[in-house]
Amino acid sequence: MQKFQKFLLLSFLILTFTGLSLIYSPPAWAKSLVLIGGDLEPILQNCPGDPSPRDPAFVHTQAIYEKMIELAGGKGVAKIGVITAASRSPRDDDKAQDRCSARNYEANGDYYVEAFKRFGAAEAERIPIDIDHISNKNSREVAQQVENLTGFFFGGGKQSRLIETFFNEDNSDSLVLAAIRENYEDGAAIFGTSAGTVIQTGGRYFRDSSRSLPMITGGQSYEALRDPDQELCVQDDWYALFNKYCRDCDDLSYYPRDRDDLSYYPDGGFGFFNYGLLDTHFAERGRQGRLVRLAWEEYIDDAYAPDENTALVVTDVDTPKVEMSVIGERGVNIFDLSSAEKNTGACGHQADSYYERICGVKYTYLTQGDKYNPLNKTVTIASWKSTLTGLEHHERAKSPSKDVFSSPDNKVRYRRENPRELLYMAYDLFDSHSTKTYGETYEDDPIFKVTLTKDKESESTGYYGTCEGEDFYSFKNLLLDFYVDKTS
């Protein structure tokens, strides 16, 4: 009898502790993000000019979709909610056009739903919130719709529309955003492209909880460095500006300032990413100057920016195991301002203190297969890439660039003459025995210089490798100086 009683007691204790472990165990899926730099390739082959499945760009886009589905539970399991509220409202001419021409949120939403299903999602559905159905953000029915989803994809467009459609006027979460946030905390994944990526930043900066992360909303690199502190466009009252000026314009940076001026929203976006600032369409549009300037202005040491058709994948978010990796056609730009100063090196000799100067910024560029630890800033280069040190092909770097920020004013047939210019300068420098090169701005009132330096103390290193017949370059800790040359 005593043995039976002991058996019952032991069984009770085992069941009790098992139940407690289930209650306090972490979620089945750790939190994860896929942050895309915009311009995913069209992959449904429904329209003229869509790339072939054999096209490398198509292959990379497919890999990004498959990664999102994997992080949302895997093929045959993932249930994706598609949110295209950042896109503009459909107009009458759009409604009369087919899906190949339309660029409104309905067409975008249907496209993404079909794409997710094609690559293995068990379910994909559009979340019915947009600028014409703003009241749905506090709909219990829509909130219930998102509860059973395992991933949420935010499409491109304008961040202002996402603020309008997912926050209340007091900047609190709407009912639907609160439901998405709760689902995310339980393991659902968050994805975004273009504006849908930038909106994810915000909340308290992980290195300094006294600081909140702002969200960049507009501007060009040249104007960001040219304009003094007091002239930056801080958008304190988003709702007032949106409703007064910008119901269907490109962004709030149109008002009250010129669209080329750096503008930002100090309260940030959704706050799912708190490791630093975010930007997109990056090297293609020469946005290095504007992102570095905002990071400097707001005392943020870390900034991240995926290029087009490329994703920054963040797993184990908000844990000591957090890891960042890169998939896609191009790369992810990472800036470390922890050692940056205004009066060191070339910055100490700038002729006119009216203009911004920032020196000693560490620039890392990671491509396919590379990884990054944001906690200790450790770079892990893919094993199939080799260092360029000692294997450089050129004695000297090429002649200095005259369009370092890929100026929108320097165009050929409506396209920038020199997209990705600063990045190409970095590639060339690492493939030469030179230790330094520089580029100048296309704009000349004043001329800004950007100096690129391979620094031994910072362990500046370039890498190269081929994968599936494609060339990939990566580098880490290249020093950048932004300043006005005294001889200009």
Image (spheres, rainbow, N blue to C red):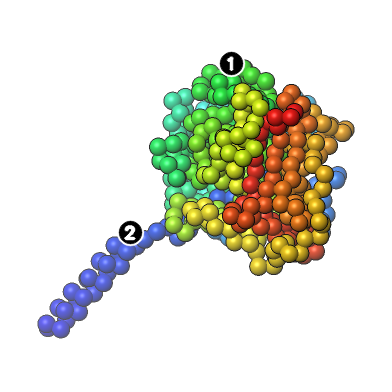
Tell which tag, 1 or 2, sits nearer the viewer. 1
Name the residue: 66% across, 27% down: 351
Pick the front one: 60 or 325: 325
Q: Quadrant of residue 38?
A: top right
Say whether residue 314 is visible: yes
Q: Amino acid at mark 1?
A: Lys
Q: In the picture provided, is 58 more to the left or to the right than 206?
A: right
How much space separates mark 1 and mark 2, taking CA atoms?
A: 49 Å
Q: Is residue 336 above or below residue 259?
A: below
Rendered image quadrant of residue 335: top right
Q: Which of the two residues, 152 or 213, is positioned nearer the viewer here?
A: 213
- Number of labels in the image equals 2
Q: Nearer the viewer, residue 266 or 76?
A: 266
Tell me the element at label 2: helix
Rendered residue at 59%/21% (across/down): 231
* Residue at mark 1: 244
Q: Nearer the viewer, residue 406 or 19?
A: 406
Can the viewer see residue 330? no
Compared with 392, 447 (above or below) is: above
- Which three-letter amino acid code belongs to the residue tagged 2? Ile
Mark 1 and mark 2 lie on one chain; the one further toward the N terminus is 2
Quarter occupied by the C terminus: top right
Reading the image, the residue beneath label 2 is: 23
Q: Position of residue 308 (x, y in %)?
A: 71, 45
Q: Residues within 10 Å of mark 2 (few under 14, many from 20)?
A: few
Q: Are marks 1 and 2 in contact (CB under 8 Å)?
A: no
Residue 152 vs 174, above or below: the answer is below
Residue at image position (67%, 55%) is 475
What residue is at 27 percent from the left and 67 percent from the top? 17
Percent position (x, y) of residue 174? Answer: 46, 33
Say above or below: 160 vs 425: above
Q: Which mark is residue 275?
A: none
